[in-house]
Amino acid sequence: LVQLVESGGGSVQAGGSLRLSCVASGVDFDRSRMAWFHQAPGKEREGVATIWTGSGTTYYPDSVKGRFSISQDNAKTTLYLQMNALQPEDTGMYYCAAGVGGSWHGLFTRDYMDWGQGTQVTVSS
């Protein structure tokens, strides 16, 4: 049974930073793909960072490239998302996801089987 528990959300001003954490249980960190998704109010869930946990290969959409960084701690089976230079449009729920394959970029929700409950991020201008 896979369980993903996110934390680290909060309220910050534009230009600030946050680091989100996702503690994963039941995930094989040698051969999984994990990701962070953002869901703004009234919008669909969008991928903002993916990582192949075995190789450490990452992918980011242009909207966050250079601002967000995904990383993992295999010993703690924890996934992180470092978010810098936050903007009001980054406001929303952030979800951790785990899977084993899918598209080459891993930004589709259908690429993942397991999801956390989400953590709220609010960025004020």
Image (cartoon, rainbow, N blue to C red):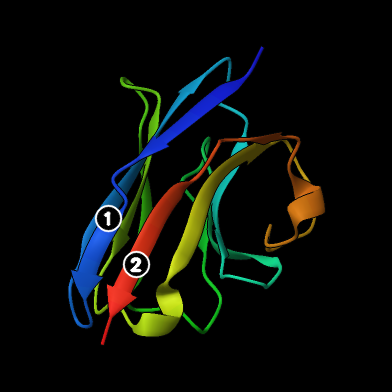
Residue at 68% x, 57% y: name it: 106
Q: Please state which amino acid type lies under the numbered disc 1.
A: Gly
Q: Could you say whether the residue bearing mark 1 is in a helix, strand or loop? A: strand
In this view, the residue in front, 30 or 80, is: 80
Residue position marked by numbered label 2 in the rendering? 122
Spot occupied by residue 107 in the image (x, y as percentages of width and height): 68, 62
Quadrant in which the N terminus appears: top right
Residue 28 visible to an observer of this rendering: no
Q: Is residue 29 above or below residue 104?
A: above
**Mark 2, other Cα within 10 Å: few <14 / some 14–19 / many ≥20:** some
Q: Amino acid at mark 2?
A: Thr
The answer to whether residue 52 is left or right of residue 113 is left
Estimate the x, y position of residue 122 in percent, counting from the top left.
34, 67
Q: Is residue 101 left or right of residue 76?
A: right
Image quadrant in which you'd find residue 86: bottom left
Q: Is residue 42 above or below residue 118?
A: below
State the image coordinates of residue 73 (x, y, percent, origin top left): 32, 32
Q: Tag 2's secondary structure?
A: strand
Using the image as rendered, state which of residue 104 and residue 18 is in the foreground.
18
In the rendering, which numbered label is found on residue 40? none
- Disc 1 crowd rating (10 Å Cα; few below 14, some 14-19, many 20+) is some
Q: Evaluate if marks 1 and 2 touch, with contact meaning CB atoms under 8 Å apart.
A: yes
* Residue 122 seen: yes
Which quadrant, please, contains the C terminus? Answer: bottom left
Who is closer to the viewer here, 3 or 71? 3
Q: Residue at x 37, y 60 (%)?
A: 121
- 79 on left or right of 8: right
Residue lying at the far bottom in this picture: please name it. 125
Q: Which percent across, then down, holds residue 104?
A: 74, 61
Query: Which residue was labeled with disc 1?
Result: 10
Residue at 51%, 42% (x, y): give it: 55
Precedes in sequence: disc 1 or disc 2: 1
